[in-house]
Image: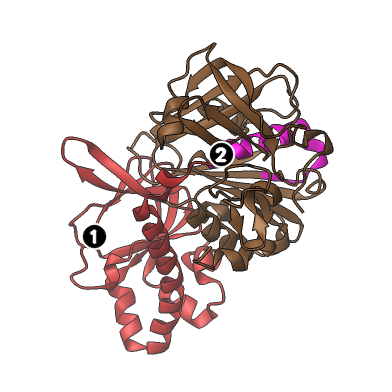
């Protein structure tokens, strides 16, 4: 089951934002940016958890933490500017402040995956919530079997964390395949949809834990591809998005059948949600 | 030194193929080595062959005036390349360019079509091997056409 590390439980007053300054801002691509926040006190989080970020005067949105869980002094978020709040966050400068609530939710099963091969499948900005898992795996590499990452994006210009992608590509005993949907002749990697590249990774399906993050269409297709490869659906974990508001399971905005995405997720085991994913009324 | 039937036997395409059929279709095949940048076929040219990639990678491209070549799919070792030889007017729809040193088994499409026509059992064996990857590519192409990565904001 997805986990919430005890130390990463929400603060005692989870509805009150903490004024938190931006300490670093990185432009990842045309519409994606990363910023670091330095909270007054260290904020432990588990890979896969999210914060609610409030752009004052505009609104509040849930954003997964994309930084290193071993560094609770710094909260890193990677955001695509698609709406008014994310666009407002994209205009922040170093020293500007945002309202911060969190961390919330259940994260990736990094402890439970120890001893297993681990596959990560990310689509678009879905790499951001999985980056803390990659940091974790690299830091605790001996505790896991084979590790593979598949990352799909629209085009080479849309790739995020490019410097780290190159580092990970050179990392021994770490399989990385990046597939873009279209590219010029200079692109050396895979072109096409992300799931066919799964066949190029080495893993033992009977002993593999997989984690998927991206658009829900991609999640469904990837989960089926993993099942076809022989991975049990109880060992496939997905991170879901819904309209989250309170982030603590009170308001009901993110209700998903019997679940609240904010509280019971955002990470769920696939066997728990696969029937719900097929329900279009949800 | 391996003959063409040996090379074919070790390609996933031939998995489960009986020895007689394998020997029959191997008569239409030969081994090729392509250097990076070599074109396997060009858009609009006669589609008279298909390839089983043993090693390497090939980019499928189309040329956009003023913008250059765009790759929409890379085909890798263990996969098949080329479907236009199957249907009239047997004309290549796209460019195919080796992006690294590539070793492949190339089939004479006309030769293989003739053997399939002569023996429907062989034709059915070939169809069973062509349809699954083609359907999977169609499914992937639909996903690419949806441009779904635009919607993600995790």
Please provide the residue range marked out in magenta: A126-147
Q: Secondary structure at mark 2?
A: helix
**Along the line of sight, which residue is nearer the eye, A261 or A30?**
A261
- Is residue A62 visible to the viewer in this orientation of the structure? yes
Residue under circle 2?
A: A127
Q: How is the image coloured?
A: by chain
Marked residue chain, label 1: B
Residue A93 percent location from the top left of the image: 48, 14
Question: Residue A127 colored magenta?
Answer: yes
Point 45% across, 29% down: residue? A58
Please tell me whether the stretch drawn in magenta is mainly helix, strand or loop: helix
CA distance for labels 1 and 2? 36 Å
Point 67% across, 58% down: residue? A259
Q: Secondary structure at mark 1?
A: loop
Point 72% across, 53% down: residue? A209
Vertical order, A60 against A267 (above or below)? above
> What color is chain A drawn in?
brown
Q: Nearer the viewer, mark 1 or mark 2?
A: 2
Residue under circle 1?
A: B92
Residue B114 percent location from the top left of the image: 29, 80
Residue A170 percent location from the top left of the image: 61, 30
Q: Position of A159 compared to A112: left or right?
A: left
> How many marks can you see?
2
Vertical order, A278 against A200 (above or below)? below
Marks 1, 2 in one chain: no
> What color is chain B drawn in?
red
Point 63% across, 27% down: residue? A17
Question: Residue B67 colored magenta?
Answer: no
Vertical order, A237 against A18 (above or below)? below
Residue A225 percent location from the top left of the image: 57, 61
């Amino acid at each position: 089951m997805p986990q919430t590390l005890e130390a990463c439980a929400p603060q005692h007053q989870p509805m009150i934002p903490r004024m938190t300054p931006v300490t670093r801002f990185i432009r990842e691509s045309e519409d994606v940016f990363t910023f670091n926040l330095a909270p007054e006190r260290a904020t432990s989080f588990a890979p896969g958890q999210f914060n609610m970020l409030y752009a004052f005067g505009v609104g509040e949105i849930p954003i997964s933490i994309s930084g290193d869980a071993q560094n609770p002094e710094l909260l890193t978020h990677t955001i695509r500017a698609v709406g008014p709040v994310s666009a407002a966050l994209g205009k922040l400068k170093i020293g500007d402040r945002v309202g911060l609530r969190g961390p919330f939710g259940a994260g990736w099963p990094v402890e439970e995956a120890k001893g297993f091969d681990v596959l990560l499948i990310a689509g678009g900005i879905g790499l951001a919530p999985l980056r803390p898992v990659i940091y974790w795996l690299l830091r605790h590499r001996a505790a896991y079997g084979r590790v593979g990452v598949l990352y799909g994006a629209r085009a080479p210009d849309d790739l995020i964390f490019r410097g780290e992608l190159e580092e990970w590509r050179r990392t021994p005993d770490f399989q990385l395949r990046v597939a873009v949907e279209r590219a010029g002749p200079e692109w050396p990697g895979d072109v096409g949809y992300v799931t066919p590249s799964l066949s190029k990774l080495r893993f033992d399906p009977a002993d593999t834990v997989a984690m998927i993050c991206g658009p829900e269409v991609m999640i469904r297709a990837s989960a089926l591809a993993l099942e076809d490869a022989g991975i049990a659906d109880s060992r496939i974990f997905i991170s879901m998005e819904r309209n989250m508001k309170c982030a603590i399971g009170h308001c009901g905005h993110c209700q998903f059948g019997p679940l609240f995405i904010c509280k019971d997720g955002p990470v769920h085991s696939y066997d728990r949600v696969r029937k719900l994913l097929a329900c279009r009324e949800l | 030194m391996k003959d063409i039937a040996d090379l074919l036997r070790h390609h996933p395409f031939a998995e489960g193929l009986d020895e007689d059929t394998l020997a029959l279709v191997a008569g239409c095949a030969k081994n090729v080595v392509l250097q990076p940048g070599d074109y396997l076929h060009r858009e609009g040219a006669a589609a008279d062959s298909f390839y089983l990639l043993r090693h390497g990678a090939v980019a499928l491209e189309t040329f956009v005036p003023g913008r250059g070549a765009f790759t929409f799919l890379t085909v890798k070792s263990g996969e098949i390349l080329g479907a236009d030889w199957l249907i009239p007017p047997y004309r290549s729809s796209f460019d195919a360019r080796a992006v690294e040193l590539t070793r492949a088994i190339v089939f004479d499409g006309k030769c293989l079509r003739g053997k399939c026509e002569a023996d429907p059992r062989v034709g059915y064996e070939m169809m069973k091997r062509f349809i699954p990857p083609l359907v999977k590519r169609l499914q992937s192409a639909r996903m690419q056409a949806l441009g779904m990565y635009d919607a993600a904001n995790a």
